[in-house]
Amino acid sequence: MSKGSKQDPKGLIFESYRIEGITKPECRSIFLDWALSLPLEQDTGTAIRTLLDQYLPTHPDHPMSQVLNEGLTSMATPRRRGGWRSRPRN
């Protein structure tokens, strides 16, 4: 995987693996920016799986690997957040 690939158009994930001492909260922020930068027609789950296939074997304990795994898991179990529509009507 290289900077500017189809799965990582801005090279955000690529660069996150190069940052010495990066923390999980910083990786979450980068992940959000990455997800928002993907083209609408690109499947996010497929992109995450491709990135994990690339980085997980050599960086299993990296915080970004953990965040990517969480992103994949979160996508598989969507939840509706509360709000005015979740309240029963009288």
Image: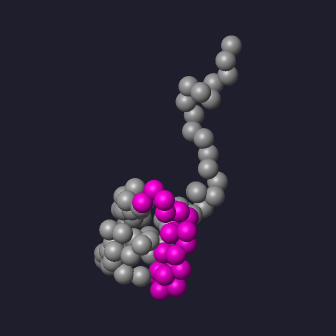
Tell me if residue 49 comes above or below residue 88 in the rendering.
Answer: below
Total marks shown come to: 0
| Up/down of 46 relative to 1, above or below | above
Task: Estimate the x, y position of residue 28 in percent, counting from the top left.
Answer: 42, 60
- Left or right, 9 with respect to 66, comes to left
Place residue 32 in its image quadrant.
bottom left
In the rendered image, is residue 62 in sight? yes
Any magenta on residue 69?
no
Residue at figure coordinates x 45%, y 56% from the top left: 40
Say if 8 sits above or below 87 in the image. Answer: below
Q: Residue at x 67, y 18 (%)?
A: 89
Tell which of 46 and 41 is nearer to you: 41
Residue 4 as seen in the image, left or right of residue 73: left
Question: Could you say which is closer to the camera, residue 70 or residue 40?
Answer: 40
Residue that appears at 47% across and 80% down: 55
Say which of 33 and 22 sits in front: 33
The question of residue 51 being in magenta is answered with yes
Coloring basis for residues: one colour
Q: Magenta residues?
A: 39-59
Residue furthest to the bottom in view is: 58
Percent x, y of residue 12? 34, 69
Residue at the limit of the structure toward the front, as seen here: 41
Q: Quadrant of residue 5?
A: bottom left
Quarter of the figure with the C terminus: top right
Residue 32 visible to an observer of this rendering:
no
Measured from the top left, where is residue 77 in percent x and y? Answer: 64, 54
The part of the image, by quadrant, that contains residue 1 is bottom left
For the view shown, which residue lies furthest in the top direction?
Answer: 90
Residue that appears at 60% across and 61% down = 73
